Amino acid sequence: MFDQFKVVTDPIGDSVALSAIFAVLPLLTLFVLLGVMKVKAWLAGVISLVVALIVAIAVYAMPIGQAVLSATEGAAFGFFPILWIVINAIWVYNLTVESGHFDVLRRSFERVSPDMRIQAIIIAFCFGALLEALAGFGTPVAITVVMLMALGFRPIHAASVALLANTAPVAFGALATPIVTLASVSSGANPDPRLTVDTLGAMVGRQTPILAVVVPLMLVALVDGRRGIRQTWPAALVAGVSFGLAQFVAANYISVPLTDIVAALVSAAAVVLLVRVWRPVTPADLGREPEAAAVPAARGAVDAELAGPGTVRAAAGSRSGTSTAAPALDGPGGETPPGDPRIDETAPVGRHRGDGDDLEPRPTDQVRAATAGARRIADTPAEVARAYAPYLIIIAIFSIANLGAVKTALAKEPWTVKFPWPGLDILGGNGKPLSSMTFTFNWLPAAGTLMILAGILTALILRVSVGRALRAYGRTYVELRYAIVTVMAVLALAYVMNQSGQTNTLGAFLAAAGGAFVFLSAILGWIGVAVTGSDTSANALFGALQVQTAAKAGLDPLLLAAANSSGGVLGKMISPQNLAIAAAAVGMAGREGEIFRKVFGWSLVLLLFMCVLVALQGSPVLGWMVP
């Protein structure tokens, strides 16, 4: 039962092609259940895991014990470090809701621009990129999606916008962890001296910046259709071009780990400066200030969604009141706008709902002023500073933790413990033990633990009592219970596929294309991220295969390795792991399939764009772009 297992790539008739038919079954099951049959994500994940186990045991002759142990390691990895990050990041958000400072932050963003299309660019694209740079692993989606909800975006639009925006910065996320991983696995499989963090980062920095230029345009199209592009293209182009240029410069000439931090800050500053001198034409039914918009699903109560053309169900949030439905846009916009003007005419201004249902004072020194029939609150500079404090704390903590000396110290015992997963004994095709059998328990330097530290400091600064903070932490687990099952099931699926050889079979099948593989290389990374939800994992999975295939087909190993990471970022938005995080955050747990269908087309369009770009970089047309 616990016999040693050796990975075989072609178990069916010594044919990779025939074996690939069975290897793809778990993925097909997952995507069909989610996208076609509309099965809840946690159930789709569990069913697909069972399929992967059956294929591993029946087709790949993996011992039952090894298959089950592989699944348990994947589930454990799904909780730590991935869910550990997401849960604690949402807890930090919940603390800001508890204190009322999230409303202050929301109003601060509104003052930059009341236009929801500009807000989508600033929050989902710029601020989300900063969060990706610092933490990654689902944190940007978890936080930006609830910020968009608070600004009046409907749940499915908030989730879709957050997922689409979380593309261009992913390759350099978590201080370029995906690039570091890619350099580690690819340099050991190919002697090319360019396969280093700096050169790989430079190459990725000549692919994803081009992607960054078009993503903000897609965001405004998702928010408001053709009208959105026509009216806000200057802001979208400024955001995309400034981000792309900054990402290119930082990756090639400054620092690979700091690439996204530099790009996010430059892009945000550029958009803020632009809207000081230029403002788009904002339609009355789109540009609004939802002062009493329901606090999103991280509080566990939202269930708002499109009920039909031009109608909106009132959200069950932190307040009660009337909700005015936004009319359908049959004109230039091409679709119903994502928000609805909810102005609370019953709740006292300057107060919010805390524990239980008792109204508690919001941050003090706020002044009421009625403008155009809507209630507005002027926040003092001190309260605005407190509202931004949690995110400044996160930036400071993560920056300190990633300083060279600190990072090296925390990577050692007792702060980081590495151990082989008990009972797991698997050899790769080369006869060496798989590195994935070693579990890294970095309990202190893990991003989730750093988030807890940030949460404690946040509670102190925002004056949230210990009892309220602990209750908020418990609620966070309850609200994310389905997402927790989904993520753990999907990571268990990924580990079974990886350690049984199913993923290797799919990679070898695509690699058989020879010279044409330069076009397909990005697809391999896309598949890896779609399955694991992580560009880091996809690079660890396929990085070596990419450079080995390059050697056999006479292609550039640097280009293919970078394409694996750049193509992988486009699978992030359709990963069940990230779909579950987004759905839980907006109160759509169990309806991940709806979000999947909303973003799948965008993912394919961007993937085709990346495939063409990589193919051109592998030809004389754009070959000069390869270092």
Image (cartoon, helix red, strand yellow):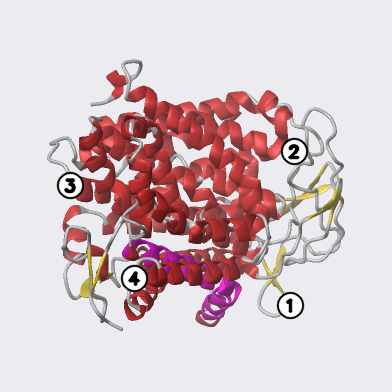
In the figure, residue 301 lies in which quadrant? bottom right
Q: Give the amino acid type for the residue marked by disc 3 in the picture.
A: Ala
Lower sequence index among marks 2 and 4: 4
Residue at mark 3 to residue at mark 2: CA–CA distance: 53 Å
Which residue is at a point 34% across and 70% down the rendered structure image?
A: 61
Residue in front for this viewpoint, 258 or 168: 168
Lower sequence index among marks 1 and 3: 3
Q: Residues within 10 Å of mark 4 (few under 14, many from 20)?
A: some
Residue at mark 2 to residue at mark 4: CA–CA distance: 59 Å
Q: Are marks 1 and 3 in contact (CB under 8 Å)?
A: no
In the figure, residue 512 lies in which quadrant? top left
Q: Nearer the viewer, mark 1 or mark 3?
A: 3
Q: What mark, if any, has residue 505 been given in the picture?
A: none
Instruction: Tell me the SS state at disc 1.
Output: loop
Lower sequence index among marks 3 and 2: 3
Residue 519 appears in view? yes
Residue at image mark 4? 61
Q: Give the amino acid type for the residue marked by disc 1 in the picture.
A: Asp
Q: Give the amino acid type for the residue marked by disc 2 in the picture.
A: Gly
Residue at image mark 2? 287
Q: Which residues are magenta?
A: 470-499
Residue at image mark 3? 189
Residue at image mark 1? 357
Q: Are marks 1 and 4 in contact (CB under 8 Å)?
A: no
Q: Are marks 4 and 3 in contact (CB under 8 Å)?
A: no
Lower sequence index among marks 2 and 1: 2
